[in-house]
Each structure stands twice: as C-alpha cells, then as structure tokens.
Image (cartoon, grey):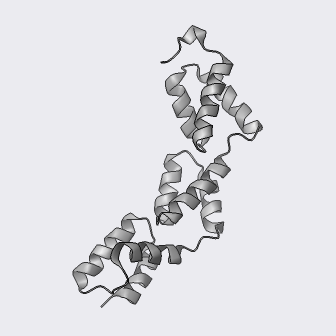
Amino acid sequence: MVAKEKDVGPNDVEAAAVGFLAMREHSRFELRRKLGRQFHDSALVDTLLDDLEARNLLSDQRFAEQYIDQRSRKGFGPLRIRAELSERGIGKDLIVELLDESAFEWRESLFEAASRKFGDAPASDRRELARRSRFLQQRGFPTGLIGHYLDDNGL
C-alpha cells in the first residue's frame, strides 16, 4: 500500500530505499525509478539518494562491479553487459573503465558459454557454425572473439 502523499516523510523514503538496497545493489537510476513510483516527491527522493551516496550505501561503481561479475559468470559478453549497464543508468565513462580494466578474461568466458551450450564437439556443418555464432552474438561477445572460437571449433 502506498502512503498518502501528505503522510510521507524522509524516514518513509529512506526505509523503502534501504529495503531495496538490502535485497541487492541498485544503481542510482534504478533506485530513483523505484522510489519515484512509490513516492511522488522527487526533491525528497533526490535528497535521500544524495545522502545515501554520501554514506556509501548507494554506489554506481559498486553496483556496476557486481553486475559485471554476476553477468560474466553467467556467460554474457562485454557488449551485452555494456548495453545492460547503460540501461540501468551507469555512465559511459564508468562502464568503459570497469569493462576495459576488468580482470575478466572474455575469451575464456566465451569458450565456457559455448561449451555449456554446445558441448566440446566441433561443429558438424556450416549451419551449426552459424547457429553457434548467433548464440554468441546474442550473448554479447565481440565478433573477433567469436571468429577465434569458430576457427577453433569449426569444420
């Protein structure tokens, strides 16, 4: 139940925000959107978000680092992760910094995702190569890495 606008105070907004953050990290953009649905006083929401950032309870960098780690472990590539972070309000500079400097080995991730999906057997024909290529493109891997995989696992 959403409280009536006149009954809403800073403590109500903070309690909702901390509740969201207790479940998982959020970007500022995500948290603002969720709180905006519940509380229509945007100035109060923005003030609270500034306070949460000052107290280091809300951090776009921490959110992005965890998001990259989580999605890469699930077999998604840097292009898809970049797009998803952008949709979640993470700035381009931070995305570039974290994805380019990440210790994550994208080639290894691509080979693991392909192995989970297709096994270790090489492709039997060109149609199978195309299917594997489409899968890896949808996962967000760059075409250069996909080409290396197809060279190693092709006809």
x and y percent of residue 42 in the render?
A: 59, 23
The tally of labels here is 0
Q: Is residue 68 above or below residue 110?
A: above
Q: Identify the residue at image location x=34%, y=69%.
A: 135
Q: Residue furthest right?
A: 55
55 and 100: which is toward the camera = 55
Of all residues shown, which one is farthest toward the top? 6
Residue 122 higher or lower than 15, as above or below: below
- Residue 11 at x, y = what percent? 68, 20
Q: Residue at x 72, y 38 (%)?
A: 53
Q: Is residue 31 left or right of residue 51?
A: left
The C terminus lies in quadrant = bottom left
Foreground pick, 82 / 122: 122
Instruction: Give coordinates of residue 92: x percent, y percent.
Output: 59, 54
> What residue is shown at x 59% (from left), y 42% (from top)?
26
Q: Quadrant of residue 24?
A: top right
Picture layout, residue 9 above or below residue 147: above
Measured as percent of width and height from the top left, residue 10 is found at 67, 19
Would you place residue 73 above or below residue 30 in this image? below
From the viewer's perspective, is 119 left or right of 100? left
| Residue 17 appears left or right of 74 | right
